[in-house]
Image (cartoon, helix red, strand yellow):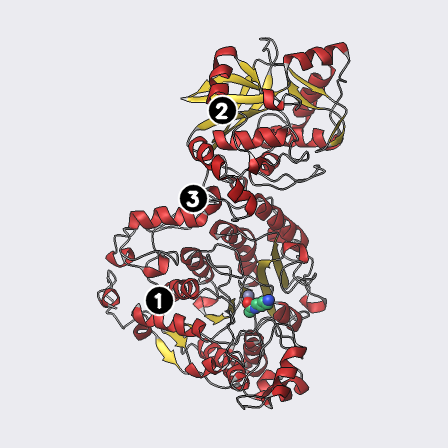
Amino acid sequence: MESAKKKNDDNGDDAGVERGRVGLLYDERMCKHHTPDGEDHPENPERIRAIWRKLQSAGITQRCVVLNGKAAEDEHIASVHAHNYIKMIRNLSTKEVDPRRNKIASKFNSIYLNGGSSEAAYLAAGSVIEVSEKVAKGELSSAVAIVRPPGHHAESNEAMGFCIFNNVAVAASYILDEKLELGIHKILIVDWDVHHGNGTQKMFWKDSRVLFFSVHRFDFGTFYPTGDDGSYTMVGEGQGAGYNINVPWEHGQCGDADYLAVWDHILIPVAKEFNPDMIIISGGFDAAVGDPLGGCRITPYGYSVMMKKLLEFAEGKIVLALEGGYNLDSIANSVLACVKVLLEDKPLSGALEAYPFESTWRVIRAVRKELCTYWPILSNELPKEALAINKKVFSFELISSSDSDAENDEAFKAPSESKNDSIGNLVEKFQNVIRPLSLIPFEESAQVKAIGSSVSWRAVFAKTDIWYACFGSNMWMPRFLCYIQGGQVEGMQKPFPGSIDKRLPKDIMWKIMPHRLFFGRSHTCTWGEGGVAFLHPESSIDDKTYMCLYRITLEQFNDLIVQENVLVQENVQHDSMITPFFDSTSLDSAVTNKSIVLEAIKEGWYSNVVHLGTEGALHILTMTCSLSDVESFKSGEHPLRAPSKGYMNTLVRGLVQGKQLSEDEAISYINGACTKPL
Ligand code: X5A
Ligand code: ZN
């Protein structure tokens, strides 16, 4: 509380006199909705209490216009819900115990009802109407409605997923249908709850006045609410075609970098074009780091940047309505961070050191492709920096603040962190929050526990960097990243598990090496029919091979060896690697003898690690076949074979995107390597 009062004021504002009027709506009556028998449930009254307490103790409530809840009118709810359904919710008994009410609840998916449910549902919907109207009128510059039950899963005649009335949809319809005089004709709904906003999507499916945007875990249709509704192919219909945008994550674990990539490459460009008169955020905080249901990793800092970027539109007319979010600390800190942005506090200094997942780019591309006919700005190629590994992806200006407030800023701490962290510690801890996969095995599975003894070599090897030099399909970075982050890209017939340490390469560079490239083998699991690339282990000065070098750790290099040698299929899971295949003795030997065949995997096609010299202080290593394999290729015992089409495309892509050769040059370079006898 102290810190809020002595809030810095470079601009001469006094505490309590804010530039704008930020509304905060909270009403204890919405806590009356809880499980009928008091069983634990993630969607419980403590959620909004925790948020409110946090805002109070941070001294935020006194800087805002605080409003009480207000019940919605049936006629306003009726713009998106069926009359019979409204009647049923209206008439839910207020008795403490009511078996009939339990029976009603059981007809719906993921719904409980008690004596306070009806009142809370009316208050939640009415409260979002209330603040939306005030923001639309300009009485408030922006507002946050801390409401429950949430709303975005609720459909016209159906409660669902902890939601009874679709609060945000009710409010948007009210403003558009009933308050024409306010001049709000286009509303952007941003649904950043980790779940798809199926209800809202349906309600505005054919409506071009509402641009519904939802980013959510989809997991190929297996994540709640499951099915195809959350797919990126669902773009709306009729007048509303193009006004429904879904960004479906393939997995959990997405964090700040992934969300901000979506902001920069989908939401913000479209919002510029749509030019909303008002924005309503379906603000679930279940994609926050620490959430028990979401599994994603947005930090309060991430939310604040997402919010800040939206504040540029609609003259800042933004309403944030709470949806999900089930870790009390996470939601409190995240909401606090958002309110601070609305209050135009200085953003906390910080940097995004993590990169989006490869799957994130895949999803972004798919969405852009699907929607570019409606939003031509999306048809442009993604800026190449988006794929450059060594650069920051985001342009957001981070003010390096000397504001003493920031140091004590609870909002920007991960939930489990204690007080009194220095700013330096915070930034450091954030990096762990942003990319904890790199440091911690993601699951405490039996398998992971079983490798306890391997943790020691991993910890040590994680500290040594090497340059991994590749000459085949790995020259195309997205393909290489399958070995690090896991996954499968175009042309590949199977996915890879990735490395245990999923941190991206720290650097990338190209070199031309005096080595002999050739293609052999007739079939591979990864590419199907056709040969794959090898390097003659003994260099010959008159040959030239283009090599793409990635700076990775020795630990990752070991995980690469396993995947390159197709041991994964043979059930030699690399995460059960007790000892590394390539250890410091192997490294010494590779340095001294130029190469070393790894005995443990000598059956693999790439069991020969070749030392190609050093770059700076780091060793350059590659993997190829053994000398005896070269003899077999020469004798015809193993076939020499040109690459398959998919493999060829990948090689060409790598060389072209790596800016080494034009497409024609790349093709003739590969063809040259295929036709020249060994
Ligand atoms: C609003 C919200 C989640 C429902 C999950 C049901 N609902 N398993 O986050
Ligand atoms: Zn949710």
**Closer to the camera: disc 1 or disc 3?**
3
Which residue is under mark 1?
343
Examine the rendered structure and indicate whether residue 596 appears above or below residue 644. Answer: above
Please, what secondary structure does the residue beneath circle 1 have?
loop
Q: x and y percent of residue 516 in the render?
A: 63, 14
* Residue 394 seen in this snapshot: no
**Closer to the camera: disc 2 or disc 1?**
2
Q: x and y percent of residue 169 in the render?
A: 58, 75
* Residue 294 seen in this snapshot: yes
The answer to the question of whether label 2 and label 3 lie on touching residues, with beta carbons closer than 8 A, is no
**Closer to the camera: disc 2 or disc 3?**
2
Examine the rendered structure and indicate whether residue 329 appears above or below residue 518. Answer: below
Does ligand 2 reach within 8 Å of label 3's beta carbon? no
Q: In this figure, what is the number of numbered marks?
A: 3
Q: CA distance from mark 2 to mark 3?
A: 29 Å
Give the number of the disc on residue 583.
2
- Looking at the rendered structure, the kind of residue marked 1 is Leu
Q: Residues within 10 Å of mark 3 (few under 14, many from 20)?
A: some
- Looking at the rendered structure, the kind of residue marked 2 is Asp
* Image quarter (top left, top right, bottom left or bottom right) of the C terminus: top right
Please, what secondary structure does the residue beneath circle 2 have?
loop
Q: Residue at x 40, y 64 (%)?
A: 329
